[in-house]
Image (cartoon, helix red, strand yellow):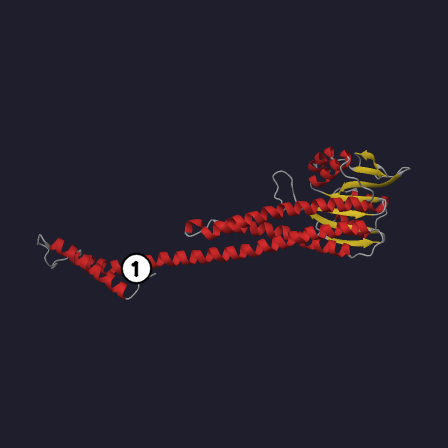
Amino acid sequence: MNEELSCELTAFPYAVIFKKSGISRILNSKQPLVLKRGENFFWQHLDYADAETLNTLVNTYGIEQDVAEALCDDSTRPRYFREDEALVVILRSINYNAGASPEDMISLRIFIARDKIITLSHRRLPLLGQIYRRLSSGNLKINSPMQLFLSLAQDMADGINDVVIDITENTADLEEKVLDADSLGDFYLQNQISDTRRKIISIRRYTAPQKEIFLSLQNDKGSFLSDDDRGDIREIYNDITKAVEDLDYCRDHMAVFREELQSKMSVSMAKIMYTISLVMVIFTPLTLLTGMLGMNVGGIPYSGSRYAFAAVCGILLLLALVIVFLMKRLKWMNY
């Protein structure tokens, strides 16, 4: 077992066994569990990357080989399926670990049966510790594995919505900055827009399939779902749907912001190039004239006159004024 997981499980027990009135036992052991008299079900959390986990699922808990392999697969996407009277759900949770990016979502695999709920992850998942603390403090009452799963799912949905709210607020701030951007110096905003778009894409990649999971669960005809469970599933579905819609809203706005910045950049560059062109039009004839008079050859007229320099300067000024007058008449300076 890796060090990171060991540190997490020092604070969070491997297993919680429930009886009708609440928690019966808390075990810091990954050994297979057997319910005692009066105990209804247990919750066990395992490391799916542990070499012993697959064997425990198949040989001890009687889970089908292909189902156990799906639970222990290194690369998964959010989905759910039924296996006889059991339910298998694979979700993604916001990464709240210190120094981690929230969009680097953590995979949580869940096996739900009438007498057990088994959760599996590899990286530290603070969400599980929060659930345990609520259970041990009596703030959360659980009567079935499905209720525990729905509590986990609701907390995951709330975590996603909290991050999406931050993204929405960031989008509003970016909108104000983009509208105020009027020079090339403001186009550092493109980096902020790109970072926000990457975050939106990463979160939506896993959140959108989770919306479909709870839509399917809501319509599932399985006998393991009570009317109250279906009501909780409906609320979770609504929360995740709102998160996906807000992500779509922010993603579309990021595309508009990017186009707006590119448009402003094009206009600014056009103004700069136009100004440079005007300067070149004015000074090119003057440069030609002064270049000819500066040639180091004989025959330059009035080279010995004391008034020649002043006369040339006057001619250059007059020529510049004539060029500017003509450009105004031709409306070249009305940008």
The three-letter code of the residue at mark 1 reads Leu
Residue 236 position within the rendered picture, expressed as x and y whole percent measured from the top left: 72, 50
Is residue 63 shown left or right of residue 244? right
Residue pictured at 80% horizontal, 52% vertical: 66
Q: Which residue is mark 1?
A: 278
Residue 18 seen in the current view: yes
Residue at the outermost left position: 305
Rendered image quadrant of residue 28? top right
Q: Between residue 219 and residue 87, name the one nearer to us.
A: 219
Residue 292 seen in the current view: no
Is residue 328 shown left or right of residue 105? left
Rendered image quadrant of residue 329? bottom left
Residue 266 position within the rendered picture, expressed as x and y whole percent measured from the top left: 42, 58
330 versus 207 height, above or below: below
Residue pictured at 18% horizontal, 59% vertical: 318
Residue 132 position within the rendered picture, expressed as x and y whole percent measured from the top left: 75, 37
Is residue 270 shown left or right of residue 161? left
